[in-house]
Amino acid sequence: MGLISEVLLLPLAPVRGGAWAIRQVLSEAERIYYDPATIRAELARLEQQLEAGEISEEEFDRQEDDLLDRLEIATRTSAGLGNGTAP
C-alpha cells in the first residue's frame, strides 16, 4: 500500500516539498528571532538610538519591554532544552 500511495500522491510532491521548505524557513527565522545574542545586539542598538535622540523615551521603553520578553522566552526555552539553543 505504501508504494501505491506514493505513486498516487506523486503529483502532490511539489506541494509537499514547498511545505517542507516553508517549515525550514520558519524554523530558522524563529531560531534567529529568539537567539539571545541577537536580542542583546538589538538592545544595544536600541540604547544607541535613545542616546542619539533618534527615538523617544516612550518608544525605547516599549521596544525594550518587547526585547526583554523575547529574551526571557529564549532563556526559558533554552533552559528547557538543556542544550543552550532557542527553539
Image (cartoon, helix red, strand yellow):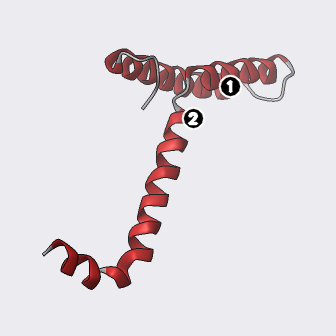
Mark 2 lies on a secondary structure that is helix
Q: Residue furthest left?
A: 1
Residue 86 in the image: above or below residue 20: above
Task: Give coordinates of residue 45: x percent, y percent.
Answer: 75, 23
Residue ID at (47%, 67%): 18
Specify the amino acid type for callout 2: Ile
**Which one is nearer the viewer's eye here, 77 or 20?**
20
Residue ID at (38%, 69%): 16
Q: Quadrant of the C terminus?
A: top left
Q: Which residue is mark 2?
A: 32
Give the mark count.
2
Mark 1 lies on a secondary structure that is helix
**Which one is nearer the viewer's eye here, 47 or 87?**
87
Q: Nearer the viewer, mark 1 or mark 2?
A: 2
Q: Quadrant of residue 60?
A: top right
For this view, does 79 lie left or right of residue 25? left
**Which one is nearer the viewer's eye here, 46 or 83?**
83
For this view, does 66 lie left or right of residue 73? right
Q: Earlier in the sequence, mark 1 or mark 2?
A: 2
Task: Give coordinates of residue 62: x percent, y percent.
Answer: 58, 27
Q: Quadrant of the N terminus?
A: bottom left
The tag on residue 52 is: none
Q: Which residue is mark 1?
A: 42
Residue ID at (87%, 21%): 52
